[in-house]
Each structure stands twice: as structure tokens, then as C-alpha cells.
Image (spheres, rainbow, N blue to C red):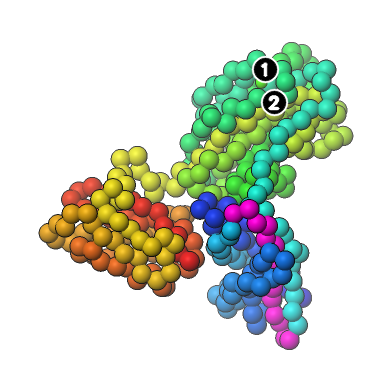
């Protein structure tokens, strides 16, 4: 009997979400596989060929969908095997979700965060309300890399503190304690907690502001209550911003939309590029997925169209090399 799991949905921005699921066929060759989604009923489906995957391994399937802002969707994985239909659990995708504002139960403070140092950059703080929002502080990171983090709390002496670090890698405004709690430590008898944060290679959203939330709590209360990214008993929260750079967007790249009109967006089949000024000679264009994989490369003349019918749905980056400058523009393929 195949095992199916609807794991998470990544908010890629521009009303595009990547639905993710995991499949373990348990040695069976599945007859059909799909991700079903919809508002009240599962009236949309992304079909996936199970023959592209091994039968004896757990693997990820995913697909990008367009959503309408403000709506709530459900999705699940569906498999067919020998005439029987199997479903994963149903997960919800809420385009209206906002980050919870942290609360502290016990206002007689035992622990405050006095400073946070991430990758050598320090933010000192003195607030005592239980939550300080430093989300305007942005740390640029790369997938697969590790970064030093140290947290100095206000309590001096050998009486344990607990620390929690969450990053909303899928950008859905929920800190998932199973997949997005990147560090935790209970009952640490130290005034400065030092650790490393490793940015994963999968299930992350690139080139977007992702919230990092740090919490400190008085130990025994935290152990009883468990990790909660929205509440601690006797401690403090601080929020920061992480941006995982894909490397696709270089600082010295030029905006393609300044020299050309690129339309339509979203695009179904033909992407048109009309340069403001006609020039002699050819340019080279390249199209990348947001994960950095090159999917198309060709030469382009003045005012041409590119056939994108073979690309799957999602966000792509168009790069054009013209007169020794690199111009970029993002677009959505429906
Ligand atoms: Ca603080
Ligand atoms: Ca999340």
C-alpha cells in the first residue's frame, strides 16, 4: 500500500505557490499520481508521471499553481494502484495567513534577549515588552551554508535558559516546529548561547524576505510547554529577516523592463520581447528556474517571441546579454 504525504506549500510570491508532497510506493509501480487542490472541492489536478521515479524509494513531487489572493485552498496527493485510489492527508494553504504576534504568559521577566549576533552582525536591545521586532535587519545567506549565531540573555548565573530559532523557509507565515525550528536548546547554563544555523537546499523560497524568530525562555516552564513560536512563559521574542540569495540576481544586473517591453505576464505560450530601440545584431537570452536551473538558451533578434509551451508552471528569470550588459526580468508561466 503506497504511503502519501502532503508536506508543505511554498509561497513563491506573485500569487504563485509550490505544492509539495512525498510518495513512498513500497515497491509498487503506481498507475497514476497527482496533486489535487481547490477551495471547497478538489477540482484542480496536477498530474505527475510515476514512471519517472523509483518504486523502492521515498521521493518528492511538486507543482506550481496560481492562486487568488485572500482565498484558502486545500490540497492532497492522490495515487492509483491496481484499481484502488489512495489519498494523503489534506493540508491547507491560506493566502491570508499572517505571522502570529508573540505573547509572553508571565510578565515577571526571568529572561530577556540583550543581543543577537548573526554571521558577525550584532543587534543590541533593551526592550522589556516581551517582543522586539528587528525584521528590518536583513541577513543575506546562501542555501547549504552554515552561519554562526549567538544570543546573549539578561540572566547572569547558572540557572538554565531555553533557546529557540525558527525560520519561515516556505514563506507561508507559519513557523512549523517540525521543519522550521532550526535550533533549540533547553537548560543551558550559559549567559551567551552560541550555535550554527544551516540553510537547507530544498523547501526554501529564494530572493524573498523570510522571517527568522528567536525566543528565549525560563527553562522548566519551556520544557513543560514545549516549543511554541507564538508564546513563551517567561522570556522574550525577537524577529529578524533572512534572505536566501539564488545567485541569479546580481547587484550589477540591469532591469530588462527599462530597455524592453516583456509581455504577457503571466504567459501561457509566447513571451514577447519588444526592445525600445532597435539594434543591429543578435542577443543571447537564457531562462532559469528560481532554483537556478537553466531551462532555455537561444539567440534572439529585435522584437521576437519565445515559445515557452514546454515549460511547467512557475516563476522564471529571463536574462538577456546585450552589448556586454546583463538584463533580467522575472515572469510567471501559467
Ligand atoms: Ca531584546
Ligand atoms: Ca512556514
Q: Position of residue 38 (x, y in %)?
A: 66, 66
Residue 58 shows up from this direction: no
Q: Residue furthest left?
A: 280
Residue beneath disc 2: 131
Q: Give the main secondary structure, helix, strand or loop, of the magenta stretch.
A: strand
107 w.r.t. 7: above or below: above
Residue sitting at 59 percent across and 18 percent down?
A: 124
Q: Position of residue 85 (x, y in %)?
A: 74, 79
Q: Closer to the camera, 285 or 157?
A: 285
| Classed neighbour count for the residue bearing mark 2: other residues with Cα under 10 Å, few (<14), some (14–19), many (≥20) | many
Tell me the magenta residue range.
69-83
Residue sitting at 77 percent across and 13 percent down?
A: 157
Q: Ligand 1 closer than 8 Å to the CB at disc 1? A: yes
Q: Which residue lies furthest to the top in this view?
A: 156
Name the disc covering residue 127, or none: 1
264 w.r.t. 69: above or below: below
Report the side of 201 relative to 26 (left or right). Answer: left
Q: Residue furthest bottom?
A: 83
Q: Position of residue 164 (x, y in %)?
A: 71, 33
Instruction: Confirm whether the magenta stretch covers residue 70.
Output: yes
Q: Where is residue 73 in the image (x, y as percent from the top left)?
A: 67, 60
17 w.r.t. 166: above or below: below
Residues marked 2 and 1 touching at CB (< 8 Å): yes
Quadrant of the image occupied by residue 272: bottom left
Name the disc covering residue 309, or none: none
Quadrant of the image occupied by residue 129: top right
| Classed neighbour count for the residue bearing mark 1: other residues with Cα under 10 Å, few (<14), some (14–19), many (≥20) | few
Q: In which quarter of the image is the N terminus?
A: bottom right
Disc 2, SS: strand
Disc 1, SS: loop
Residue sitting at 33 percent across and 58 percent down?
A: 262
Amino acid at each position: 500500500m503506497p504511503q502519501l504525504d502532503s508536506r508543505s506549500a511554498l509561497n513563491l510570491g506573485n500569487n504563485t505557490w509550490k505544492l509539495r508532497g512525498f510518495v513512498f510506493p513500497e515497491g509498487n509501480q503506481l498507475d497514476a499520481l497527482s496533486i489535487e487542490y481547490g477551495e471547497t472541492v478538489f477540482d484542480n489536478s496536477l498530474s505527475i508521471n510515476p514512471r519517472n521515479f523509483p518504486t523502492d524509494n521515498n521521493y518528492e513531487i511538486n507543482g506550481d499553481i496560481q492562486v487568488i489572493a485572500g482565498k484558502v485552498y486545500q490540497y492532497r496527493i492522490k495515487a492509483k494502484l491496481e484499481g484502488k485510489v489512495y489519498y494523503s492527508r489534506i493540508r491547507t494553504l491560506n493566502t491570508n495567513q499572517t505571522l502570529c504576534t508573540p505573547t509572553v504568559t508571565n510578565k515577571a521577566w526571568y529572561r530577556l534577549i540583550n543581543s543577537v549576533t548573526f554571521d558577525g552582525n550584532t543587534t543590541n536591545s533593551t526592550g522589556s515588552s516581551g517582543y522586539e521586532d528587528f525584521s528590518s535587519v536583513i541577513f543575506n545567506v546562501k542555501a547549504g551554508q552554515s552561519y554562526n549565531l549567538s544570543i546573549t540573555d539578561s540572566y547572569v548565573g547558572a540557572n538554565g535558559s531555553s533557546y529557540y530559532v525558527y525560520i519561515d523557509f516556505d514563506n507561508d507565515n507559519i513557523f512549523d516546529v517540525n521543519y522550521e525550528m532550526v535550533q533549540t536548546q533547553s537548560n543551558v547554563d550559559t549567559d551567551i548561547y552560541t550555535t550554527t544555523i544551516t540553510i537547507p537546499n530544498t523547501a526554501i523560497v529564494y530572493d524573498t524576505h523570510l522571517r527568522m524568530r528567536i525566543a528565549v525562555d525560563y527553562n522548566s516552564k519551556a520544557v513543560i510547554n514545549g516549543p511554541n513560536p507564538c508564546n513563551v512563559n517567561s522570556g522574550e521574542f525577537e524577529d529578524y529577516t533572512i534572505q536566501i540569495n539564488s545567485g541569479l540576481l546580481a547587484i550589477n544586473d540591469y532591469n530588462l523592463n527599462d530597455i524592453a517591453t516583456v509581455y504577457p505576464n503571466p504567459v501561457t505560450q509566447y513571451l514577447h520581447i519588444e526592445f525600445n530601440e532597435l539594434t543591429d545584431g543578435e542577443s543571447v537570452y537564457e531562462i532559469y528556474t528560481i532554483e537556478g536551473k537553466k531551462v532555455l538558451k537561444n539567440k534572439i533578434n529585435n522584437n521576437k517571441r519565445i515559445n515557452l509551451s514546454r515549460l511547467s508552471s512557475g516563476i522564471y528569470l529571463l536574462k538577456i546579454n546585450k552589448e556586454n550588459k546583463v538584463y533580467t526580468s522575472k515572469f510567471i508561466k501559467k
